[in-house]
Image (tube, rainbow, N blue to C red):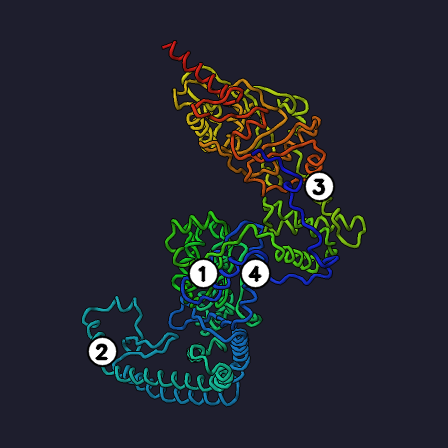
C-alpha cells in the first residue's frame, strides 16, 4: 500500500498546552542533568567504590554535558569527604639525596613550614649573641688559658729534650719541627749536604733517640688539644642548646602527635649542633668550613637544607580535592625537580621539588581529558604506574641531551586518588582491547546518551534547564512558545520525533543567539520568532557552499531535471557534512543496459571512487535481479551504473534503491518521473531499508525544486522506517500543505516503481508469469531477449 505522508507525519510539533507557565521565570531551575539516568547511576556508583581498580572512564560525544555534569557531581561528592593531609619535603640527614616526605593534618603543613623558618631565623639572630656573651667568653678564655698553661709545660719538656740531643725544637704555623745543630748552630739543607757520612749518622741517631723519648710528650700534647676542643664544643653546644632547645620545644609541642616530624626535629637539632659555627663565622677558619657547604647547596647558602618545602597545601580545601587537569603533560601531572644555573652547571635542592596534579588530587579526584593524556608520550604509562603502585613520585624524564642529572630522588608519597578519564568511544575501545592494565584499573564505564525520550517529564525538565541557564548566564526569560520551538529543535538534532537530543551545547548556543536577537529588538522576553530568527541566521552564516551548489544547478553546470520523465535516469540524494552544517545534495544517477555477460557494473568502483559499502549495495542489486527474473534462465546482460558529475569518493548504500529503480526503468524502457528524488537502501528481497540524514536530503531536494519552480508534481521517496525521523523545516511543510511538494514512505521496490512510473510493478500469476502491462513483465521480456541474443551469438 502506497503511503503518502500527511502534514502531521512530517513534524512532531510541541504543543504549548503542556506548559503551565507563561515564561521560564515561573519555572524552578533544573538541578542535575536530563536524560542521563544510566550515566548518572554509573558515575555515582563509581564515586562510591573505594576498592582498587574502580577508576572511571567517562565517554560520550562533545556537548552532552559530560564535562559540566562531572564537575558538579564530583565536586559535590568531594565536599562531603574529609580533607586529606598536607605534605612537606624536608632534608633527609641520613640520605641527603632523598628528601623526606612528612604528612600533616590539613593546614598544618604551612604552620610547620612557618615554624621551622622562624626557628632558623631566631637561631641566626640569637646564637651569635650567645657566643658573644660575657659568660661564654669567660668560660672559653678559661678553657683556652688552662690549655695554654698545660701545653706550655709539655712544650718546655720537648724543648729541653731536643736540646739534650743537640736539636732545636721550634713551633711553626702548622705544628712543630726539630732542627739538628752543630756547634750550637742550626743546620740548613745546604750545610747538611756538606757534612761527612759519620757526622750525618750521629745526627740521625740523635734524632731517632729524640723521637722515641718525645713520643709520650706528643701524645700528651694531642690529648690536651682534644680535651680543649671537646671543652670548646661542649661550651658551644651548651650555649647553642640554650637557644635551640626552647625554640624547638615550642615546635615539638605543636606537632607532638606527628612521629615523623618529631624524628625530623631531633635530626635537625643534632645537625645544628654539628654546624653551630655556621651561625657564627668568627674567623677565617669558619669561612673555610662554610665554603664547601655553600658550593654543595647553591646560591641559597649552606642553610638551604633547613628549609621546608610545602609540597601540597590543603589548608584552604573544603572536603576532598578535585583537580581538573586541562593540559595533561607529564610534568603537569607528576611534578618536576627544577634547576638553576650555578658556576657553569645546573644544581637543585629540596625546595625545587614541585608538585603535579596527581599530588594535589591525592585523597580526592583527578579528572583528565583522555585525548590530552594520550597526546603526551610519557603521561599514560606514568599514570598507570602511579595508580597501580599507589605511590606518587617526583622524577624528571631522563633527557640525555640536556646533560642534567637530578641527583635528587624524593621519597614517594602514598597515593589514594580516583582518576576520571573523559574521552571518546574510540579511545575506550582501543584501550580496552589492547591495554590489559586499563581493564584492571578503569572498571567503571560511564556512557553518556546522545538522546532521551520525548516524554512530558523530559520536556518539562528541558524547560527547567532553560530556566537554570537563563538565571546562571543572565539571559532574558523565554516565552513558552520559544520553549516549544527549542523542544522541536532538540528533536531535530536527535533526528527522531520521539526523542530529544542531549547535545546541550547546541541548545545553549541557540539560547544565547535567540537572546541576542531579542535584545536587538529590545524585547522583554525571548519569543518563538527569536528562535526562528536565530536558526535562520545560523543557517545563513553556514550555508555558503549549499548556495554555491544551487547556483551550479541553476546555471546548468550541474545537470539535474526536476520536471518531465526519462528512461534509466533518476535523482538520488546524498548529504554533505561541512562540520557545523550539513545539507542535502541531489545527484543524477543513470543506468544503461545492453546485451552481454558482465552483469551490473559499478562505474564508480571501476574508477576507484567507490567505497566498500556502496560496492555491497550494487552487489545486492544483482542478487535482487537474479531472484526476481532469473529463475527460468540465467541473467545475460551488462548494466552500467553511474553517479554523474561525481569526482570524489562515494560510499554508503542509501542510493541503492534509486540505482535499482533506474536499472528497472532502463530494462523496461519505461520512463521515471524526474520530479522525484529517492533515498533508501534495498536488500535482496526488495525491501527498502532506512538511511541517515533524511531531513537534510528532503530539504536539499525541495530547495532545488523551489528555485527551479514547484509544479505540484515533485517530491521525495523515503523508507517507511524514516517516518519517525522527520522534523522538517517550515518551508517544506508549507509546500506540502499547499500540495506543491509530496513525500512518500515506501516499504518495497514495487511501491516505489509504481509511484515513479505510474504503472504497477507486477506480480507473478499462478503460471509464474508477470501480468502484461506491468513494469516487471517488460523487464523480464527484455532479459529474455538478451538471453536469446546471447544464445544466437554462441
Side (left or right) of 105 relative to 496 = left
The residue to which callout 2 is attached is 206
Q: Whole-percent x and y of residue 448?
A: 53, 54
The residue to which callout 4 is attached is 71
Q: Earlier in the sequence, mark 3 or mark 1?
A: 1
Q: Whole-percent x and y of residue 5?
A: 63, 37
In the foreground, 279 or 611: 611
Which mark is nearer the camera, 2 or 4?
A: 4
SS assignment at label 3: helix
SS assignment at label 2: helix
Side (left or right) of 155 relative to 568 = left
In the foreground, 110 or 678: 678
Side (left or right) of 470 relative to 42 = right
Which mark is nearer the camera, 2 or 1?
A: 1
SS assignment at label 4: helix
The residue to which callout 1 is attached is 55
Q: Quadrant of residue 91?
A: bottom left
The residue to which callout 3 is attached is 536
Q: Is residue 423 visible to the viewer in this orientation of the structure?
A: yes
Amino acid at each position: 500500500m502506497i503511503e503518502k505522508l500527511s502534514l502531521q507525519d512530517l513534524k512532531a510539533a510541541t504543543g504549548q498546552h503542556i506548559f503551565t507557565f507563561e515564561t521560564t521565570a515561573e519555572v524552578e531551575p533544573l538541578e542535575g542533568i536530563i536524560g542521563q539516568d544510566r550515566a548518572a547511576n554509573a558515575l555515582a556508583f563509581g564515586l562510591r567504590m573505594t576498592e582498587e581498580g574502580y577508576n572511571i572512564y567517562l565517554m560520550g560525544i562533545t556537548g552532552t554535558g559530560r564535562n559540566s555534569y562531572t564537575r558538579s557531581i564530583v565536586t559535590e561528592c568531594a565536599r562531603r569527604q574529609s580533607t586529606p593531609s598536607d605534605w612537606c619535603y624536608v632534608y633527609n640527614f641520613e640520605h641527603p639525596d632523598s628528601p623526606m616526605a612528612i604528612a600533616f593534618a590539613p593546614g598544618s603543613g604551612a604552620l610547620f613550614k612557618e615554624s621551622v623558618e622562624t626557628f632558623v631565623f631566631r637561631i641566626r639572630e640569637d646564637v651569635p649573641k650567645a657566643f658573644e656573651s660575657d659568660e661564654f667568653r669567660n668560660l672559653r678564655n678559661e678553657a683556652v688559658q688552662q690549655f695554654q698553661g698545660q701545653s706550655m709545660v709539655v712544650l718546655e719538656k720537648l724543648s729541653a729534650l731536643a736540646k739534650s740531643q743537640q736539636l732545636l725544637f721550634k713551633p711553626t704555623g702548622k705544628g712543630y719541627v726539630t732542627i739538628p745543630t752543630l756547634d750550637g748552630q742550626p743546620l740548613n739543607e745546604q750545610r747538611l749536604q756538606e757534612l761527612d757520612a759519620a757526622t750525618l749518622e750521629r745526627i740521625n741517631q740523635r734524632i731517632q733517640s729524640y723521637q722515641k723519648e718525645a713520643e709520650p710528650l706528643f701524645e700528651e700534647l694531642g690529648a690536651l688539644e682534644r680535651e680543649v676542643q671537646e671543652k670548646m664544643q661542649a661550651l658551644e653546644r651548651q650555649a647553642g642548646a640554650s637557644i635551640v632547645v626552647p625554640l624547638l620545644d615550642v615546635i615539638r609541642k605543636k606537632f607532638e602527635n606527628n612521629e615523623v616530624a618529631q624524628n625530623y626535629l631531633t635530626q635537625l637539632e643534632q645537625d645544628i649542633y654539628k654546624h653551630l659555627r655556621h651561625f657564627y663565622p668568627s674567623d677565617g677558619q669558619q669561612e673555610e668550613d662554610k665554603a664547601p657547604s655553600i658550593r654543595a647547596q647553591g646560591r641559597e647558602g649552606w642553610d638551604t637544607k633547613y628549609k621546608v618545602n610545602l609540597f601540597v597545601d590543603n589548608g584552604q580545601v573544603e572536603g576532598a580535592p578535585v583537580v581538573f587537569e586541562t593540559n595533561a603533560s607529564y610534568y603537569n601531572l607528576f611534578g618536576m625537580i627544577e634547576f638553576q644555573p650555578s658556576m657553569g652547571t645546573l644544581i637543585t635542592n629540596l625546595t625545587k621539588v614541585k608538585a603535579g596534579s596527581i599530588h594535589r588530587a591525592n585523597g580526592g579526584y583527578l579528572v583528565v581529558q583522555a585525548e590530552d593524556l594520550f597526546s603526551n608520550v610519557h603521561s599514560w604509562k606514568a599514570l598507570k604506574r602511579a595508580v597501580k603502585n599507589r605511590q606518587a613520585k617526583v622524577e624528571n624524564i631522563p633527557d640525555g641531551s640536556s646533560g642534567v642529572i637530578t641527583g635528587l630522588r624524593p621519597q614517594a608519597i602514598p597515593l589514594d586518588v580516583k582518576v576520571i578519564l573523559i574521552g571518546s568511544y574510540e579511545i575506550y575501545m582501543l584501550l580496552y582491547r589492547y591495554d590489559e592494565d586499563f581493564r584492571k584499573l578503569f572498571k567503571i564505564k560511564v556512557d553518556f546518551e546522545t538522546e532521551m525520550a520525548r516524554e512530558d517529564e523530559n520536556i518539562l525538565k528541558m524547560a527547567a534547564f532553560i530556566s537554570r541557564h537563563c538565571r546562571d548566564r543572565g539571559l532574558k526569560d523565554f516565552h513558552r512558545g520559544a520553549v516549544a520551538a527549542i523542544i522541536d529543535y532538540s528533536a531535530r538534532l536527535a533526528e527522531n520525533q520521539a526523542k530529544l537530543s542531549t547535545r546541550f551545547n547546541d541548545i545553549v548556543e541557540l539560547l544565547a543567539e535567540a537572546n541576542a536577537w531579542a535584545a536587538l529588538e529590545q524585547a522583554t522576553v525571548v519569543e518563538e520568532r527569536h528562535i526562528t530568527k536565530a536558526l535562520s541566521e545560523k543557517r545563513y552564516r553556514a550555508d555558503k557552499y549549499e548556495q554555491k551548489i544551487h547556483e551550479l544547478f541553476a546555471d546548468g553546470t550541474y545537470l539535474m531535471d526536476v520536471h518531465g520523465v526519462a528512461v534509466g535516469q533518476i535523482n538520488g540524494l546524498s548529504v554533505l557534512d561541512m562540520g557545523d552544517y550539513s545539507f542535502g545534495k541531489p545527484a543524477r544517477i543513470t543506468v544503461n543496459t545492453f546485451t552481454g555477460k558482465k552483469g551490473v557494473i559499478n562505474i564508480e568502483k571501476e574508477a576507484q571512487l567507490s567505497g566498500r559499502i556502496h560496492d555491497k549495495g550494487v552487489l545486492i542489486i544483482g542478487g535482487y535481479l537474479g531472484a526476481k527474473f532469473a529463475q527460468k534462465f540465467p541473467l545475460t546482460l551488462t548494466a552500467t551504473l553511474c553517479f554523474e558529475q561525481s569526482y570524489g569518493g562515494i560510499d554508503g548504500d542509501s542510493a541503492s534503491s534509486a540505482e535499482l529503480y533506474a536499472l528497472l526503468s532502463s530494462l523496461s524502457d519505461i520512463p521515471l518521473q524526474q520530479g522525484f528524488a529517492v533515498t533508501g537502501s534495498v536488500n535482496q528481497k526488495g525491501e527498502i531499508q532506512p538511511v541517515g540524514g533524511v531531513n537534510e536530503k528532503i530539504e536539499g531536494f525541495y530547495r532545488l525544486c523551489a528555485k527551479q519552480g514547484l509544479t505540484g508534481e515533485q517530491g521525495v521517496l523515503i523508507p517507511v522506517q524514516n517516518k519517525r525521523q522527520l522534523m522538517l523545516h517550515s518551508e517544506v511543510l508549507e509546500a506540502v500543505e499547499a500540495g506543491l511538494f509530496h513525500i512518500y514512505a515506501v516499504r518495497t521496490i514495487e511501491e516505489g516503481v509504481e509511484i515513479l512510473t505510474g504503472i504497477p510493478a507486477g506480480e507473478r500469476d499462478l503460471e509464474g508469469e508477470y501480468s502484461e502491462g506491468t513494469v516487471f513483465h517488460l523487464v523480464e521480456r527484455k532479459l529474455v531477449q538478451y538471453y536469446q541474443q546471447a544464445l544466437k551469438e554462441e
